[in-house]
């Protein structure tokens, strides 16, 4: 569908739909908004961690995209191929060209399975699983249940950036808990290979997680990057990326291999004039406005902002994008408003989670008053499993914006 749209949104995932719904709530006519989105299925990805552990129904993570597009907003079922921001135009996979007054880029990121030799072919059988893959997420549970005494479960964390900073390790703790309940925890090795030199990027939560991994008997190997999977031999090859052994490779045998894949900007973004040197849409980290093209905004996983890539971040970025587009429409200047907020419910067992909330610089900013944010609690589990899905489907994707403020004045207890 060629044509001109006042506000053109590229990507109808968590960010694109939230922005469209919120624009409507602020009085923008639905007919002035169009969303380019190729996929007919929308996933609530944060629940994939629970699905992989057999603790959430996969059917409840997916809905038809068309049922989520706000009424009257045009959905164009195609993907954006090229961007020409100097001419305010986008070319689609269909070959058609669209023009716009304001552009919002919300394509998410690309799961780069092919960056690991043998991984694409290995995924989904013979013990190789990933909660990151909607197609194979339910296979994670099969792998957990297939572990036998004497077996080894291996988990990986890719180089940054990747979506949901806790997802690679949440499934480690849920697997340990499952093995405990099966009565075989002591007889299965659980190993976690992390690309970074730390277990989590925010020191306050990292300290808690190191203790939890230790208490769970998980062996953590830092600065190890998965480079190859041999599904016939059932070995994973890691390259050591720091320290004295930097550059060496080790082959690790596994019975279960849970992979969190490397993640990259989508090709159409990387090759566009909107990208920074790393390939992400180059926006101001507080206003979400493009640094070279004033009528272009970006949010969510594809934006260059150095926050943790989460749906929680999208919830706080979307109102800033919407407010700033409205300001430009009324001849005003944009304002800063996003402080880098992200939240990651760290599921440490079936029935327990730490709600990690933080802003730029790794500053801890809890929303719940009085409670120590570093503690694992049933309340955190309830928030993750029951509250956040409802918040996502019924509140955020419908463009509601009010939420209790996270406490930016919180003082961390001394380490
Ligand atoms: C296993 C897992 C666990 C997670 N856990 C959590 C959690 O606990 N808490 C949390 O807050 N977040 C979590 N997340 C992260 C969260 O799901 C993402 O950060 C969020 O979905 C980002 O929203 P987005 O709109 O940027 O991207 P997405 O929701 O991925 O949507 C991007 C959309 O853009 C479309 N698209 C792609 N390319 C194009 C193109 N060229 N043209 C047009 N459209 C395009 C795609 O089809 C897609 O619909 C998790 C993610 C995973 C995978």
Image (cartoon, grey):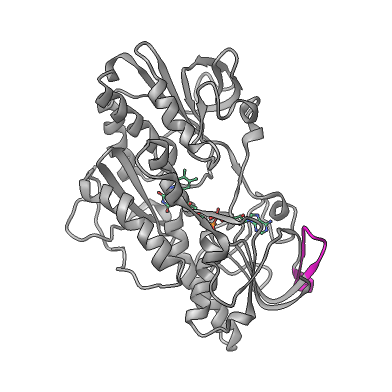
Q: Which residue is nearer to you in this view: 339 or 215?
A: 215
Q: Position of residue 240 (x, y in %)?
A: 54, 23
User: Residue 387 location in percent, x, y?
Assistant: 31, 57
State the extent of the magenta-drawn residues as a range. 85-97
Q: Is residue 413 left or right of residue 230?
A: left
User: Residue 45's x, y, as percent?
Assistant: 47, 49
Say above or below: 254 vs 46: above
Question: At 40% across and 66% down in the image, what residue appears?
Answer: 394
Q: Residue furthest right?
A: 95
Res. 104 in view: yes
Residue 197: quadrant of the picture? top left
Quarter of the image for the C terminus: give it: top left
Relative to 364, 393 lies left or right: right
Q: Measured from the top left, where is residue 324 in percent x and y?
A: 54, 77
The residue shown at (74%, 60%) is: 273
Residue drawn at 68 percent across, 51 percent down: 277
Is residue 333 in view from this perspective? no
* Front residue of 249 and 105: 105
Q: Residue furthest bottom?
A: 330
């Amino acid at each position: 569908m060629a044509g001109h749209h006042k506000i053109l949104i590229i990507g109808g995932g968590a960010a694109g739909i939230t922005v469209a719904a919120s624009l409507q709530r602020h009085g923008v006519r639905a007919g002035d908004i169009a969303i380019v989105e190729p996929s007919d299925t929308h996933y609530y990805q944060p629940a994939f961690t629970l699905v992989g552990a057999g603790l959430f129904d996969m059917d409840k993570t997916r809905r038809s995209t068309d049922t989520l597009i706000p009424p009257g907003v045009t959905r164009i079922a195609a993907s954006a191929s090229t961007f020409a921001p100097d001419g305010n135009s986008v070319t689609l996979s269909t070959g058609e060209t669209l023009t716009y007054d304001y552009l919002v880029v919300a394509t998410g990121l690309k799961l780069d399975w092919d960056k690991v030799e043998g991984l694409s072919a290995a995924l989904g059988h013979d013990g190789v699983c990933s909660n990151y893959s909607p197609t194979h997420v339910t296979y994670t549970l099969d792998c957990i249940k297939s572990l036998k005494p004497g077996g080894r479960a291996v988990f990986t964390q890719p180089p940054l950036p990747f979506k949901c900073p806790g997802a690679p390790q949440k499934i480690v703790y849920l697997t340990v808990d499952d093995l405990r309940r099966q009565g075989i925890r002591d007889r299965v090795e659980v190993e976690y290979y992390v690309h970074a030199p730390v277990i989590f990027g925010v020191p306050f939560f990292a300290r808690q997680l190191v203790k939890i991994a230790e208490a769970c008997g998980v062996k953590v190997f830092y600065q190890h990057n998965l480079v190859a999977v041999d599904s016939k031999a059932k070995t994973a090859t890691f390259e050591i990326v720091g320290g004295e052994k930097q550059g060496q490779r080790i082959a690790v045998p596994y019975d279960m291999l849970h992979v969190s894949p490397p993640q990259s900007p989508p090709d159409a973004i990387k090759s566009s004039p909107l990208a920074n040197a790393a390939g992400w849409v180059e926006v101001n980290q507080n206003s979400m406005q493009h640094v070279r093209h004033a009528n272009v905004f970006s949010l969510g996983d594809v934006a260059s902002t150095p926050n943790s890539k989460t749906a929680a971040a999208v919830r706080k970025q979307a109102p800033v994008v919407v407010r700033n587009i409205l300001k430009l429409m009324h001849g005003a200047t944009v304002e800063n408003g996003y402080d880098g907020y992200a939240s990651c419910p760290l599921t440490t067992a079936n029935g327990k989670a730490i709600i990690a909330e933080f802003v730029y610089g790794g500053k801890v900013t809890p929303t719940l008053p009085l409670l120590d944010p570093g503690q694992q609690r049933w309340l955190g589990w309830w928030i993750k499993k029951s509250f956040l899905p409802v918040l996502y489907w019924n509140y955020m994707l419908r463009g509601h914006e009010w939420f209790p403020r996270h406490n930016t004045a919180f003082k961390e207890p001394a380490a």
